[in-house]
Image (cartoon, helix red, strand yellow):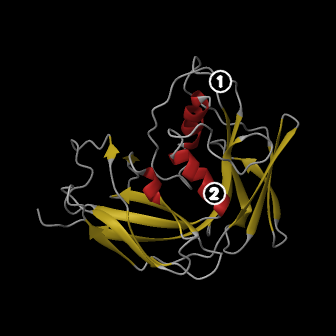
Amino acid sequence: MNKQTIITLIAALLPVVSFSSCEDIIDVDLRSVEPGLVIEGTVRMGSAAEVLITQTKDFSETNEYPPVTDAVVVVSDNAGNRETLRPNEAGRYVATSIRGTERRTYHLSVTYDEVEYTATSYMPPRVEIDSLTLWKLPVKDVPDPQVHFVDPMGEENQYYRYVLRINGVQPLLKDRLEDRLISTENVDGSVIRQPIFISYVNSGRDDDPIEQDDVVTVEMQCIDKDVYRFFDTLYRVGEAAANPVSNIQGGALGYFGAYSFTSKDIVMKWEE
């Protein structure tokens, strides 16, 4: 595995806030890498489709990733909608008519330098978070939020991803990143209770990730299997011998994901 490819991919994905959660801190070896295309496309429920295209760089070059703005980007869905996206001032390709709708399948086509890259993603129907509670490990001083929901019976909803915000800000998270994903493939239709362990750096508050009266927001995203695999391998990339598994055909890095979501807040209060 060329691990510089991984760090370049991470750096390219961090600017996108529509689908990204907290930045992933991964220790990697710094090696030379050939430039390549990174595509990140998202279709968020109720929002316009967005695509960001950048290129990887060699480690010896500057740590800047200007967007590619001369690609041909087309997004369509199985309801007969089709749109060619134009880049905005920030270099993001943003749709004007195609928006995220539950139970639709979305298709992405990106043509750049005479090469076409394609991907498909299905948006499962949203699943409501029933409640958030606090749950504390005996070895920890502060509790963590615990998500409660009922996984519907059937194959439409089997993969979920959690995005956390603390007082409205997405923190820099590290450790146990896999806890921010869940597959119910083997427990279909079950009642789910899942704690989300919080640890992050650069908090500006010594080493305490959570303080009394902080408001933690948990957004639960309903994603398809390919998007789940991308984030699962991304979070585990330090342990694996391969790059994150992309659902984009044609050789580009990144992913294309449609997702529905629900969210809830909890105020962090506990006995010390």
Q: Label 1 is placed on what type of residue?
A: Val
Left or right of 102 on screen, residue 23: left
Q: Residues within 10 Å of mark 1 (few under 14, many from 20)?
A: some
- Residue 109, given in percent of the width and then of the height, sits at 81, 51
Q: CA distance from mark 1 to mark 2?
A: 25 Å
Q: Residues within 10 Å of mark 2 (few under 14, many from 20)?
A: many
* Closer-to-camera residue (104/70): 104
As helix, strand or loop, the secondary structure at mark 1 comes to loop
- Residue 252, given in percent of the width and then of the height, sits at 73, 40
Q: Label 2 is placed on what type of residue?
A: Val
* Closer-to-camera residue (74/145): 145
Total tally of numbered discs in the picture = 2
Q: Residue lying at the far right in this picture: please name it.
A: 114
Q: Quadrant of residue 152?
A: bottom right
Q: Quadrant of the C terminus?
A: bottom left
Image mark for residue 162: none
Residue appearing at x 50%, y 40% in the figure: 239
Q: Which residue is mark 1?
A: 33
Q: Does residue 14 lie above or below 154 as drawn?
A: above
Image mark for residue 227: 2
As helix, strand or loop, the secondary structure at mark 2 comes to helix
